[in-house]
Amino acid sequence: MNKPLRRIAVFCGLLVLTLLLRDNWLQYARSDELATDPANRRVAIERYATPRGDIIVGGKAVTGSKRAKDGDFAYVRTYKDGPMWAPVTGYASQAFGTNQLENLEDSILTGNDDRLFFRNTLDMVTGKKKAGGNVVTTLNAAAQKAAYEGLAQRGKGAVAAIDPATGAILALASYPSYDPSTIAGYSDDDAKAWNKLQKKNNPDDPMLNRALRETYPPGSTFKVVTAAAALEHGLYEDADAKTDTPLPWVMPGTTTELKNEGNIPCKNATLRVALQYSCNTVFGKVGADLGNDKMLETAKSFGFTSEQFTPVRSTASVFSDDMNESQTALSSIGQFNTAATPLQMAMVASAVANDGKLMKPYMVDKLQASNVDTIAQTEPEELSRPLSSENAQILQSMMETVVKEGTGRNAQIDGVTVGGKTGTAQHGVDNSEKPYAWFISYAKADDGSSPVAVAVVVEDDNANRDDISGGGLAAPIAKSVMEAVINSKQ
């Protein structure tokens, strides 16, 4: 071979080598990046080439798939009672992607998960079409219905319910909501529906998952956390011992009196009476006496300041550090910077009901192959111990007094022991907006175990301001959710 030909051959060899290197770089180093690129339409086409597996509640599918009418997508996602289940399922849209369980468990639902390799290989050998797997949730259909319908009567709000013994989420409702079926396709109608749901076009923000992603001032429901801090840090050891709380009580470093709502017996009240009547002065002083560090420690032990993954992410609830005594006092009655998701406050009630043990909240019980073989099972996991068993039982007796004799009477259930705490949280600058109505609670079985703990928050814009209270608006919803869980276990 003469010299010019040899040079051309070497040059061509280098070109081939460069192409091979580039091909391997794209196929291996960048494969995940390209596969998840929103501009890669092939991924979406492949996702909807076969029917998606289902999201299951109580043995029944709340999702489905149907043949698409036209276009290059073979199937389109469908939902049963879509608005009620949207905070759990999320959406799977040919045009707008996926979120929540539809996103987090997409590989299972599409049948592309590596754990389904054997099943897919067997189906290929037998000539069976590839099918998606199922996501079996922990949700209780009756509890979810009670929560959603209760909120619908009030206009806006959220509910979270947990099994205290395991952390299994039993209800997760948000209102107003949306129907994921209306945005599941790729048509102009789907695009119009999507635009109508965006917050800029809809101030009610129906796509916001209020149970997981919205934080509210928890108001007096936070006094349960403050009471736990008082017991755990030894400030008080007895629910019925008098507290050293004058009336009026002036917040440290200020000339401002912390006010109580109404003419209630708060002077030197016991912790039990203070929780029963929701005395701001008692719990504000408890917070100031304990100080920011001890209050923050207890709040963190209940889950505050940390995101929760159910597996859908829940926004971190807020209890600030570096506060002075008066700011700590206000935060200890659920105001100032304190803010919590409904899930977080359900966790508070759950830990108290479970004798001080807080279980990690979760909503996926198991993942199944298309033939319903289990490929993954969630095992309950302890998250923390905010209270000793002894102190938890003291706090249970206090919360049960709230329902028997205090502000939580509307949550009473015949033949069932219920513990709870009401809250009416200030909203807006100088409390200019209508307050939020809260209620947290748990129900006890005859054997002393607790099958359900609930948190309800109501934003009722149509209610008369003077009629807004946790006991009046939120407690009846909590009662119906607890009854639904109890009845489903009988």
Image (tube, rainbow, N blue to C red):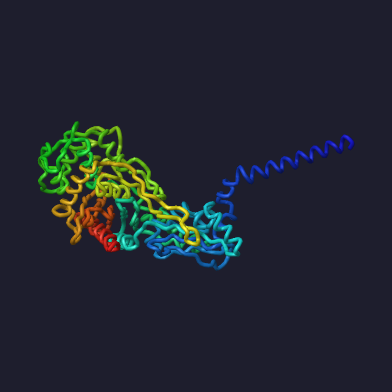
Name the residue located 33 percent from the left edge and 56 percent from the top edge. 170
> Can you give x and y, in whole percent of width and height, for residue 251 in the image?
18, 35
Residue nearest the observer in this picture, 427 or 40: 40
Give percent across and percent down for residue 74. 56, 64
**The image quarter in which residue 391 lies:** top left
Quadrant of the image containing the N terminus: top right
Q: Is residue 104 above or below residue 490?
A: above
Q: Is residue 294 visible?
A: yes
Q: Quadrant of residue 451?
A: bottom left
Residue positioned 25% across, 34% down in the render: 294
Residue drawn at the location 22% of the way across and 50% of the way down: 424
Residue 224 percent location from the top left of the image: 22, 45
Quadrant showing the C terminus:
bottom left
Seen as rendered, the residue at the extreme top is: 253
Viewed as shown, does residue 196 lie left or right of 489?
right
Q: Position of residue 126 (x, y in %)?
A: 60, 64
Whether 439 is drawn above or below 294: the answer is below
Residue 187 can be seen in this image: no
Q: Residue at x 26, y 48 (%)?
A: 354
Residue most toward the right? 2
Residue 413 as seen in the image, left or right of residue 20: left
Q: Is residue 274 left or right of residue 20?
A: left
Q: From the viewer's side, name the closer residue of 141 and 165.
A: 165
The residue nearer to you, when weighing 95 against 77, is 77
